[in-house]
Image: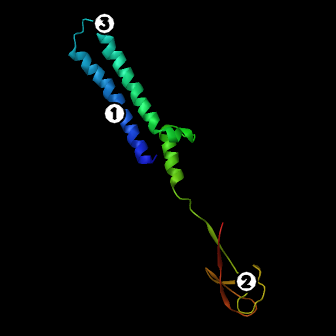
Amino acid sequence: MSSGKRIATMVIGMIVMVGGFFGGFIQFFWIDTSNVGTILFYVLVVPMVSFLVGAGIMLYGMRDSLSTGGFGMFGMMRAAASEAPKEKSYVYEPPRFCTECGASISSEQIEWVGPLSVKCPYCGATLATEKREI
């Protein structure tokens, strides 16, 4: 499930929880308050049921995060962070052999003539470095 759908189910779950909570209290003011059972129903049962339904909706939206070890908003943030591409690191190395004279080149013998080029110590040819991923 995408992070957008996860956030949408979280919001819907919160709306159900808060709406049922305040809805139970609002209904309490519209009814006859002489019966204690009716009072308890609207003050305790309706908010509790709406809390359980809203929590179920939220857990349904987080089921992918829960199965991967994340929980709640932190699990969604970790899932979103893990979807980001990893940054690659590169290093530029001098070639092992000169392309002009064929001499073997070691890193102690080379002279850097630019940020990505070296000079052959034998023939003076300018050689491009080789890009290698770390």
Q: CA distance from mark 2 to mark 3?
A: 92 Å
Q: Can you identify the residue that label 2 sits on?
A: 110
The three-letter code of the residue at mark 3 reads: Val
Nearest to viewer (mark 2 / mark 3): 3
Residue bearing mark 1: 15
Looking at the image, is mark 2 or mark 1 nearer the viewer? 1
Compared to 66, does 49 lie above or below? above
Look at the numbered discs 3 and 1 and tell me whether their residues touch, using CB distance below 8 Å. Answer: no
Q: Position of residue 65 (x, y in %)?
A: 52, 41
The label shown at residue 67 is none
Q: Please give the residue where the numbered disc 3 appears in the rendered image.
A: 36
Identify the secondary structure beneath mark 2: loop
* SS state under label 3: helix
Q: Quadrant of the C terminus?
A: bottom right
Residue 44 quadrant: top left
Label 2 and label 1: CA atoms lie apart by 68 Å
Amino acid type of the residue that numbered disc 1 sits on in the rendered structure: Ile
- Would you say 123 lies left or right of 52 here? right
Q: Amino acid at mark 2?
A: Ile
In percent of the image, x 66 and y 78: which residue is there? 130
Residue 40 percent coordinates (x, y): 33, 12
The answer to whether 49 is drawn above or below residue 65 in the figure is above
How many angstroms separate mark 3 from mark 1 (CA)? 28 Å
Residue shown at 43%/30% (left/top)? 55
